[in-house]
């Protein structure tokens, strides 16, 4: 059975490594460089959001064409769990940029699943959901 390892030295090292990875990935998104962004994603990565599923090649294509740009991308960790060579990271993301020349500012919850393969963490799945208005909870 795969179980979460609590309070081990390995977990602290993994936590630090993953937090650095999340920071670097956020910087890559702001760079608007599809090659750099893609280095953090597994080949079969997908993101699920309000409009459905977007695959890695589709996502990177809209970055490459300039249809999607980010000016800021701020990630605030809410929860991290590691399971041997897998990790689930959840947090709040506030970012802004433009999509097809229309400016956007979003505040959303994001969950990312990472798998460590050949000594390297790659994201295999992302999910985003808009933060609800305080009155809707």
Image (tube, grey):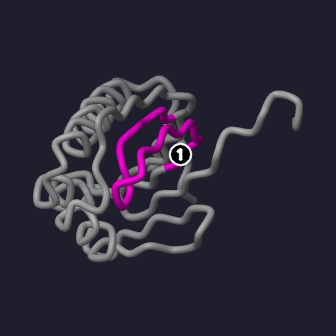
The residue that label 1 is drawn on is 110
Left or right side of 106 for 84:
left
Which image quarter is the N terminus in?
Answer: bottom right
Query: Which element carries disc 1, helix, strand or loop?
Result: strand
Q: Which residue is nearer to you in this view: 74 or 106?
A: 106
Q: Which residue is nearer to you in this view: 45 or 83?
A: 45
69 in magenta: no
Residue 107, image x, y percentages: 56, 36
Q: Which residue is located at x 53 percent, y 40 percent?
A: 106
Residue 26 sits in which quadrant? top left
Q: Which residue is nearer to you in this view: 62 or 120?
A: 62
- The extreme front residue here reads 101
Q: Is residue 77 above or below residue 81?
A: above
Residue 16 sits in which quadrant? top left
**Number of callouts in the render?**
1
Secondary structure mostly seen in the magenta stretch: strand
105 in magenta: yes
Q: Is residue 27 above or below residue 46?
A: above
Q: Which residue is located at x 32 percent, y 75 percent?
A: 58
Residue 134, image x, y percentages: 81, 28
Region of the chain picked out in magenta, as a range: 93-111
Residue 40, image x, y percentages: 23, 54
Which image quarter is the C terminus in?
Answer: top right
Left or right side of 31 for 47:
right
Q: Which residue is located at x 24 percent, y 72 percent?
A: 61
Left or right side of 75 for 48:
right
Residue 114, image x, y percentages: 38, 54
Structural crowding at the residue carrying mark 1, measured as other residues with C-alpha within 10 Å and reported as few (<14), some (14–19) or many (≥20): many
């Amino acid at each position: 059975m795969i179980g979460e390892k609590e309070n081990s030295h390995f977990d602290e090292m993994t936590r630090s490594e993953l937090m650095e990875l999340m920071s670097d990935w956020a910087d890559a998104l702001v760079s608007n460089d599809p090659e750099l962004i893609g280095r953090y994603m597994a080949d079969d990565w997908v993101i699920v959001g309000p409009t459905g599923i977007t695959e890695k090649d589709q996502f990177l294509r809209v970055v490459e064409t300039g249809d999607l740009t980010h000016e800021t991308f701020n990630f605030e960790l809410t929860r991290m769990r590691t399971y041997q060579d897998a990790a689930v990271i959840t947090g709040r993301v506030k970012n802004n940029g433009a999509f097809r020349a229309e400016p956007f500012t979003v505040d959303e919850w994001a969950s990312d699943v990472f798998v460590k393969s050949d000594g390297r963490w790659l994201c295999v799945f992302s999910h985003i959901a808009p933060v609800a208005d305080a009155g809707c909870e």
